[in-house]
Image (cartoon, helix red, strand yellow):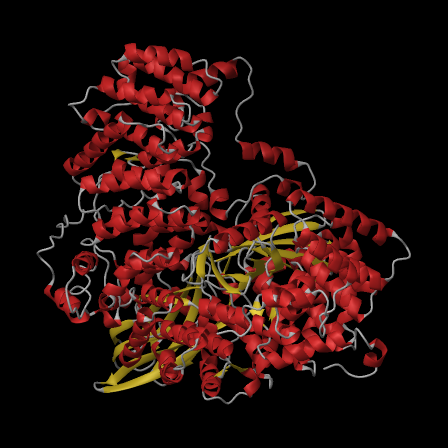
Amino acid sequence: MMHFLLLFSRQGKLRLQKWFLPLPERERKKIVKDMTTMVLARKPRTCNFLHWKDLKIVYKRYASLYFCCGLESQDNELLALEILHRYVELLDKYFGNVCELDIIFNFEKAYFILDEFLMGGEIQETSKQSIAKSVEASDMLQETMEEYMSKPAF
Amino acid sequence: MSDVVEKTLIALPGLFDSQTGAAKITNRLRQLIKSITELTSKHEEENLIKQELSAMKEQVSSPNTTMKQMREIMVRAMYCEMLGYDATFTYIHAIKLAQQGSVLEKRVGYLAVSLFLNEGHELLLLLVNTVLKDLQSTNLIEVCMALTVVAQVFPKDMIPAVLPLVEDKLSHPKEIIRRKAVLALYKFYLIAPNQVQHIHAKFRKALCDKDPGVMTSSLHIYLQLIRESPDGYKELTVSFVTILKQVVGGKLPVDFNYHNVPAPWLQIQLLRILSLLGKDDQSTSALMYEVLDESLRRAEMNHNITYAILYECVKAVYTIHPKAELLEKAARCIGNFVLSPKINLKYLGLKALTYVVQHDAKLALQHQMTIIECLDHSDFTIKRETLELLFRITNAQNVTVIVEKMLDFLRSCDDEHTIIHLVGKVAELAEKFAPDNSWFIQTMNEVFSVGGDLLQQDVPNNFLRLLAEGSESKEEDDQLRLYAVDSYLTVLKGDASHLPQHFLQVMSWVLGEYGHLQESVDQHEVIRLLTKLLDQRNVSLETRVWILSALTKISEGHTDLIADLAESLSSSQDTVLRQQAHELRHLSRDSQLHEGVLPHGAPWEGMEVDSSLSFLDGFVSEALAAGAAPYKPPHQRQEELCEDRELNLEPYSFSLPVSLSSCSITDRHSPTLLSVSSGLSGNSTELSQKAGSSTLILEGVKRVWGKDGYLPQKETTAPPVDKPSPAVQPSGQQEASERIEPQPEPSTQNQDKQQLASSLFVGLGAGSSMSLLGKSEAPPPRFRKKPRPLDSSSSSSSGTSERSSDSSSRSSRSMTDNFLYGSLLEEEPATSISAFDHTPKSTTANGLAENTDAKEDRRANTSQILGGDMVIVRPNTIQDKHPPPASSDLTALLPADLKDLPHSDVISLTSDPSLSLCSCRVFRDEALLLVIFISNCTESVIKDVAVQLGCEELETASLRGNIMDSLEGKSTSVCHYALLMDDPHTNVSFTGTVCYQTQPGHTSTLPFSGTLSTADFIRPLVVTTEEYGKLWLSLSHDVKQNLKLLTDASDPLRTTLNALKDALQLHIVDIVGSEGIVACRLLSGAPCLLHCRVNGTALAMWLRSPHPALPDCILYHCQRALAQH
């Protein structure tokens, strides 16, 4: 089970944080700080895995953005990398050529996509089409709320 | 790999102007973000955000703000929080937005709530109604949002409110809702497994759902369930195998593919489940060989996701019952991982190797060169993983090299978790495999210096215990100690200012205890070095106490050196230090007293510890004569206070969580942590309390004393291990290394590596060549720790009367295990059966003559169950098809030692023309004894009677009489089984067979079966009200339910509780007014506490137990018992 997912920039600025377990505010801040320092200190051509306390940290850099998640010891690191990758693909599909700025300015959208993809720290839906469909279904409300109410959702 | 990367900079200029697609940016947020990126300092950012927050505060409190504006504010608040600023004032508005907004605003509201409010935040309560409303909404999006937020933030105590609605969603027509509902229930299961226990059947429905997504989600729950109790789900193996086959075969819709791999997440989940199911179970494993083979074969594409699947496959293959062919394939897979140029795969290969070498150490040999390369890898993570692997293959021959590598790594490492983790491993290896004394002490010195003050306390503790307890040969021990003393003197003569506190403590203890062993060094010198330490500023208070107590031990005859020191410290601010200084002063003056208190030479022998403090008797009688009140132990005082007070929850509130074992030990007269010096410091317990770790160590020392002085050692030390010489290598290993490394030109570097390889992997080849199908045995450790003296011997010196009465309630889990395989098996052998054949008169005579004493004892022990004169208890839950035969005379055949235990009626199990079987349940404290009477109904002798009994849910052990050579005509024989229940089940059935021969060569089999209920395994738990209170607070799992109250009597509560007590053997702790507290336990294991209150015509029962399922089980039986009443 994934404990948390963080997105931060090369400068260590947090762009998105999702916590799947309840943690006190102080602990969260410590994790964010530790993760950014640890991950940013990694040299090129090293593996994408780290240890932190009893968690496994899996991270990957996409352009200027680092995707980083904390896993339990029995989880599969490669699979987690693919989870990160699928999330990037989902963002890409939604924003069309996603970049860091898309996520900065539309971070709430990034959260909505994540909520359709992961739930309680586990994969909920892996299909790109289905996720795009359910996110778009909610987005549609933006323009034609009334129109929408009269017909069934997805 | 990704076409997404490297676009940011190109996209940057265009983004501010063009808003493409759905990416619309609210203006205020856009402004905010833009201005923040333009700032240059943190200070400016703070100011800007401060302005922003105060503007938002104004806006949210204005009545004119529309929901749409609120939504925009909420997004900004989220942004501020993400930057680390506090926007608490918006939380309540987030909830309001979720409550009142339209769907779109609701979505932002819920998102804000899930980001802002942690589980347990008080504002969450305000959300319950909104969530309830949305769960019942006809709008699917609202339902989805509600389910998401429920899974994200709902704490344990709010689950009951939404549980029924979430449960309903399991049969929702839309699969996305079902999927979310299953995941929400999974989350509930993780935080409160009890509350979803009743929906297990629905989980199974989800597993069979027509939508593969819902099925996948339900596997999360199953993985968890199976991890907890694999035995309960074995029958699902075939289904899981079938599903996996279909997935691997590509039968799922393309939608589930990920980069052309069919449903990888599902595959991995299934592989994990299968490996749990097949572990240590040959027949179940056999079911999955084929599909595992198929998975290994199919996953051939060169993509991360297939490697992820392969990795799980390999793990599964090595976890389940081994099959040579699969192991071979898996090993080849690992080879591909390890040799891969991709660093992530290499890492995973190392992990797989680490896992696998536990089963087959030879695999490491094949990859030794790679492992050595990884050892020098620039990547920290890879290095660490390699060391982990080396740790697993360490043996007596390669320990020096491996430990050296680990220490090298540690010296360059600055991550404290890694240090703590690895240092513990080094210490473990050093203790286990040390080739000689000097190496051991040197290594431990390194451990203490590198580990510093991060070191876990048990490392120094174990080390000191090892030194103190020693092995059999005193000479060897002294050599080790001498070496330690020498080494520490050298260390202390150097610069000691940077040494960690733990190391200083260890050194001062050793010098104090064994300094005298080194005759060539003047004690003056030792004292001088220790005193010098006291002058150092960075030495902590705790360490000072250690140093002082060391000085106390060696001060004899050196009064001149000590006097000043003792004088100056006797006025210390710290009481512990001051007391130590006083002791030091007195002892150094009076050498006779010193000799008596701290003898050296033959340490501790003949040392009497007066734990009853009898030397204070004079003082006490004087005080009593002067009119002081007699001493009452705390529990007595408490009882007197409570006596005339109403039963209330008050005593529950002040205690720390106390485990059952510690609260039932009431041996208050002997402080178990008596320190060496406290014998002299009288009844001051302050030392042992304050100088926390010093007591820990001294505890280790104290263990060597028994009531009769020094406890002799029985075990032998392992034979000294020869140090490996590079010249003598196991030939097989050399072969292996030659085979593996094709070397075009042996450069010097390669030679170095090879040399390293031969020293690292020595001892792996020859010794473990046969271990393909089994674990190789660990070599005997060099320093073997002594078994701790038994509880009884350490506390027997005090000899209190309380002990005997609660000895059974003290027995912990481990004792239960012992009991099954140890003590009962030692009972009289089965040969005495013939004594029971139809001459009851002589039997009783025998029994009485032989067992009178034993019976006395047993009566004392089992008095809890006997509870008066009741001998036959009838838990009324046995469902038996056979009518009870007129077999009451059979109870007479119960062995004498069981006769006085409470037991059930004898019921018939089965019969055929030659044999008839009856059983009787005997309730012992620690187990249920199933006594089976085998009666020969014929006139002729029946030969080779063998009884077999089995039960999946219970641990069974045959005690005696299950195999007989012959059974005389018309006689009855008795056999016993002890049954233990670890996990409560409401009802369990057992099955068994009897094989016998009426004529030679003609074997008949007679099957039998029966049912047992939890009630058979419940025993009263005798505790006082105070103990009950403490225990109550320490228990986590609770269940509440209203039960029927037996209202037909004058005192309904008492009647009801008595009815329950009769049916379930509960112990009624106390009844006051309309409340009653009752306690019981599952055999001698998990306790269960029941708090009952009369509530109108119902009995409100509140159960607590450390075991999640026990309260439900007991509740079930209570309901039944009351219904039948």
Which quadrant would the C terminus of chain B be assigned to in this image?
A: bottom right
Q: Which of the 4 image quarters holds residue A125?
A: bottom right
Observer-nearest of B587 and B329: B329
Observer-nearest of A104 and B1083: A104
Residue B1117 visible somewhere in the drawing: no
Q: For this view, does B196 lie left or right of residue B942?
A: right
Q: Would you place residue B290 above or below residue B1071 in this image? A: below
Image location of residue B124, percent across then percent down: 73, 56
Image location of residue B985, percent across then percent down: 52, 68
Image location of residue B220, percent across then percent down: 54, 72
Residue B945 visible somewhere in the drawing: yes
- The outermost residue toward the right is B64
Observer-nearest of B236 and B331: B331
Q: For this view, does B472 lie left or right of residue B527?
A: left
Q: Would you place residue B590 above or below residue B1037 in this image? A: above
Image location of residue B945, percent across then percent down: 28, 77
